[in-house]
Image: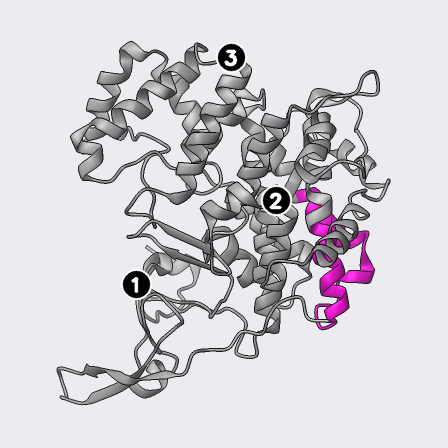
């Protein structure tokens, strides 16, 4: 059973891209490949063999590393599609299990398919009981992302029956296990930091409700899930489920290209996501708000943000890909205000500060001209703060949401017949060949 639709590389377009070598006048024709939408790509796979040259693209900002049919982003137009469906429609009308099915299998499920998928995921939510002892090796004050990296990587030591990446059934079981167990591990990480007992998952609860239950319930009393907060978390999970070939997804693919087992690959993705320039951005937003401290200080920090010589930057504004309003941020903005209204927290100092910063950024000519709109990280951090989730857990919940995207991308990579082990090249700037000098002869 295949877990993803096969990837077909688009056929070369009629046009080619011509390179001219100035020193010799030689020309080289490179095929131009056209996808179903988005920019064409220049096929440089034979560039080195034909010219003796590599391309140089730090950060791979102009390089397509793979062919994928999962997620499409048009940053200039502010468009994000999962398998062709606009993210706004999915966030408003769908649920997380349906989106998981869509990302994994390529289409929205029927009633019967969705129920079977939900059941398959639900009955994988528990973790091996020995994993509870694994937590004891961490300090109580460990960063939750450090714990997540270790525990998720260790899953391959407990589930040997789903690590053969050449077996489609193994890949499917591993995919389901990762999606199912990530909320359980995330909640265990949170409980461990508090010194509270772990709460087992409940099969009668939906995905986001179950995550909130495992985080906030105790053996002493149950936790009644607020439907507004559950809806907010559901939207956050959907909005963060996948985002094309970002740093963590590329990490998962690169690790997977070596044939590594899926649990190790997802652990690698978690490590990449931990960085403040990636998944740690919403935590950085709250740290920035703490630094600003008061609405009265906003003009000073706005001035600093505009000063090119000042290292201070406003976190949560603008995006490397989106040069228009992040479509996820529009949904998050609405959700943020719904949560604040439900909890009666409009007057809470830090959240009030965030709302004022949002207002200024949407009206200030400098921000509007440079299209530095509040992004999804700005609003998700505020929502998590209002829900009482500590900043150290923000990226953990991001990892829970993104797991399905990582798994879908990993499956697509494994099934891609053109996939090779990742091996980027370099522009070497070090010393040329030198002779070894004995230590007693060195000056």
Q: Is residue 133 left or right of residue 75?
A: right
Relative to 289, residue 61 above or below: below
10 Å crowding of disc 3: few (<14), some (14-19), many (20+) = few
Please report the residue visible at 45 percent of the width from the left and 55 percent of the height from the top.
81
Read off the residue under disc 3.
344
Please give the label number shown on residue 23.
none
Secondary structure beneath dot 1 equals loop
Dot placed on the residue nearer the N-terminal end, 2 or 1: 2
Read off the residue under disc 2.
95
Q: Is residue 168 magenta?
A: yes
Please tell me which residue lies in front, 137 or 227: 227
Secondary structure beneath dot 2 equals loop
Q: Quadrant of the N terminus?
A: bottom right
Please tell me which residue lies in front, 374 or 21: 374
10 Å crowding of disc 1: few (<14), some (14-19), many (20+) = few
Secondary structure beneath dot 3 equals loop
* CA–CA distance in space, label 2 to label 3: 26 Å
10 Å crowding of disc 2: few (<14), some (14-19), many (20+) = some
Q: Nearer the viewer, mark 3 or mark 1?
A: 3
- Residue range in magenta is 150-178
Relative to 257, residue 376 above or below: above
Q: Is residue 374 magenta?
A: no
Relative to 198, residue 155 above or below: below
Q: Report x, y in % for residue 426.
A: 37, 67
Name the image colouring: one colour
Q: Is residue 284 left or right of residue 192?
A: left
Dot placed on the residue nearer the N-terminal end, 3 or 1: 3
Read off the residue under disc 1.
429
Q: Residue 346, can we see it?
A: yes
Which secondary structure dominates the residues rendered in magenta?
helix
């Amino acid at each position: 059973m295949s877990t993803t639709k096969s990837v077909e590389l688009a056929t070369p377009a009629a046009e080619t891209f011509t390179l001219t070598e100035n020193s010799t006048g030689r020309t080289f024709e490179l095929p131009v490949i056209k996808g179903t939408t988005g920019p064409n790509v220049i096929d440089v796979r034979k560039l080195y063999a034909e010219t003796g040259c590599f391309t140089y693209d730090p950060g791979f900002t102009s390089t397509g590393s793979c062919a994928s049919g999962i997620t499409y982003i048009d940053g200039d137009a502010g468009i994000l599609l999962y398998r062709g469906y606009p993210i706004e429609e999915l966030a408003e009308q769908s649920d997380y299990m349906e989106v998981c099915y869509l990302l994994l299998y390529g289409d929205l499920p029927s009633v019967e398919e969705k129920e079977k998928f939900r059941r398959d995921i639900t009955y994988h939510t528990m973790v091996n009981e020995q994993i509870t002892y694994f937590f004891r090796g961490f300090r109580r004050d460990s960063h939750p992302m450090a714990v997540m990296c270790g525990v998720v990587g260790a899953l391959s030591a407990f589930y040997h029956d789903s690590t053969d990446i050449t077996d489609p059934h193994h890949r499917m079981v591993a995919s389901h296990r990762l999606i199912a167990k990530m909320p359980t591990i995330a909640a265990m990480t949170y409980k461990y930091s508090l010194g509270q007992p772990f709460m087992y998952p409940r099969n009668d609860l939906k995905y986001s409700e179950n995550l909130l239950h495992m985080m906030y319930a105790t053996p002493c009393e149950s936790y009644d899930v607020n439907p507004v907060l559950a809806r907010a978390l559901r939207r956050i999970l959907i909005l963060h489920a996948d985002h094309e070939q970002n740093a963590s997804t590329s990490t998962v693919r690169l690790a997977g290209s070596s044939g590594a087992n899926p649990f190790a690959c997802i652990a690698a993705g978690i490590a990449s996501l931990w960085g403040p320039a990636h998944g740690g951005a919403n935590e950085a937003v709250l740290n920035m708000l703490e630094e600003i401290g008061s609405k009265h200080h906003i003009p000073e920090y706005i001035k600093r943000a505009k000063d090119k010589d000042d290292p201070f930057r406003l976190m949560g504004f603008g995006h490397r890909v989106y040069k228009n309003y992040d479509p996820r941020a529009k949904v998050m903005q609405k959700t943020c205000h719904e949560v604040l209204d439900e909890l009666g927290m409009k007057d809470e100092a830090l959240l009030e500060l965030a709302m004022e910063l949002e207002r200024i950024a949407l009206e200030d000519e400098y921000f509007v001209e440079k299209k530095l709109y509040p992004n999804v990280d700005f609003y998700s951090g505020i929502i998590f703060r209002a829900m009482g989730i500590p900043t150290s857990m923000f990226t953990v919940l991001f990892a829970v949401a993104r797991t399905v995207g990582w798994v879908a991308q990993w499956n697509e990579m494994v099934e891609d017949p053109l996939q090779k082990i990742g091996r980027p090249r370099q522009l070497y700037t070090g010393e040329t060949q030198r002779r070894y000098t004995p230590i007693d002869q060195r000056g």
